[in-house]
Image (spheres, rainbow, N blue to C red):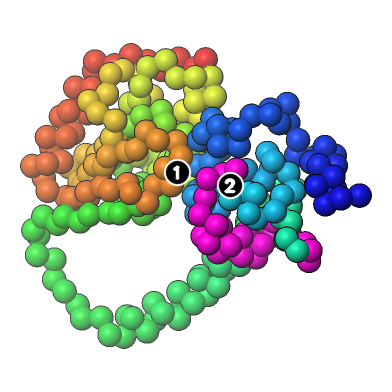
Amino acid sequence: MSRKAVLQERRTNSSFGTNEEKMHPVHFINQRKELLADLMNMGLEESEAIMYLGLLHIGPITVGNLAVKLGLDRGKMYRSLTKLRNYGLVTTSFSNPVIVTPAEPSKALETIIEKKRDELHSMKKLSQKVIINLKIHKTEIEEAGTSTFSVLQSRPIIYNRIGRILDDSKNNLIYIVTTTNDIAKMYYTSMPEKILNAKKNNVTIRVITEDKPTKVISEMIKRLNASEVRVGVLPSKGRMIVEKEKQIVMSESSEDLADSGNSDVAIHTNSMEIVQNMFSLCEFLWNNSKEFVEI
């Protein structure tokens, strides 16, 4: 049997085949921006996520043909292929030309999760040693009482800062004003657990988001565990987290579902003038919004 016939038979018998076999791979991927974003949020680069998703749709194929079908640079693909192979997301043949085959999704993603667990475990053990050594060299600095201002780059870092605000808050009121798209992203982080823990510290978390969410988003809003939720017209597509008389995080938020969040930028400040002004805005939005009704 010729190599072409073998490849065709593999595609026909592939467990990754779909009813959309005839759809052009680029068009197929463009219709799955959210799935692409999920893969990127799990640690894949955009080109790697496109390759894996494309392979699942196309089936076993040579690297050259895959590059043509996905419109990717062949040189960059070989670099991405090495990482995908190390992750266990693809396997390659010993033949010439090399044939790339996607791994079964549940096994492939479990490999990524295990790798992240190992990295987290190593980082926690190392951090204990580093913290002790850093404290030895720390100079005690008196609180100056002046306002601070910092710029946060990337969505994970922004979410981490919001999480710290929730962790440290006691007996206070926090507003979270953001889009349903951003809530969907928060849902897959530790944010619901942090909100739940903040409520145990007598913190009231009020969420204001867009009206008419989908059924899926409606369930995510419910599971965010906020004290109260209202829907209405938002002042922008960005996010705003305001802790009463304490601090604020404001940022733009990309509405592109395939955005990995690396370009997300926010400001964090404890300037009382800014905090009070934004808190007043949140109060206004809250009073002019309506109760969230789960779909």
Location of mark 1 (residue): 191
Residue at the far right: name it: 1
Q: Amino acid at mark 2?
A: Val
Q: Is residue 102 left or right of residue 38?
A: right
Span shown in magenta? 69-95
Is residue 156 rendered to the left or right of residue 119? left
Residue 22 in sight from this viewpoint = yes
The residue at the point 11 percent across, 41 percent down is: 274
Q: Which residue matches tag 2?
A: 68
For badge 1, the amino acid type reads: Met
Identify whether 181 is placed above or below 121.
above
Q: How many marks?
A: 2
Q: Nearer the viewer, mark 2 or mark 1?
A: 2
- Dot 1 lies on which element? helix
> Mark 2 or mark 1, which has the lower sequence index?
2
Position of 69 relative to 18 (above/below):
below
Q: How far from the left and from the top, in percent, is residue 181?
A: 42, 31
Task: Tell me the residue at 74%/48% (across/down).
Answer: 60
Viewer-side residue, 99 vs 189? 99
- Residue 258 is situated, as x and y percent measured from the top left of the image, at 46, 40
Viewer-side residue, 189 vs 107: 107
Q: Position of residue 92 (x, y in %)?
A: 73, 61
Q: Residue at x 15, y 29 (%)?
A: 280
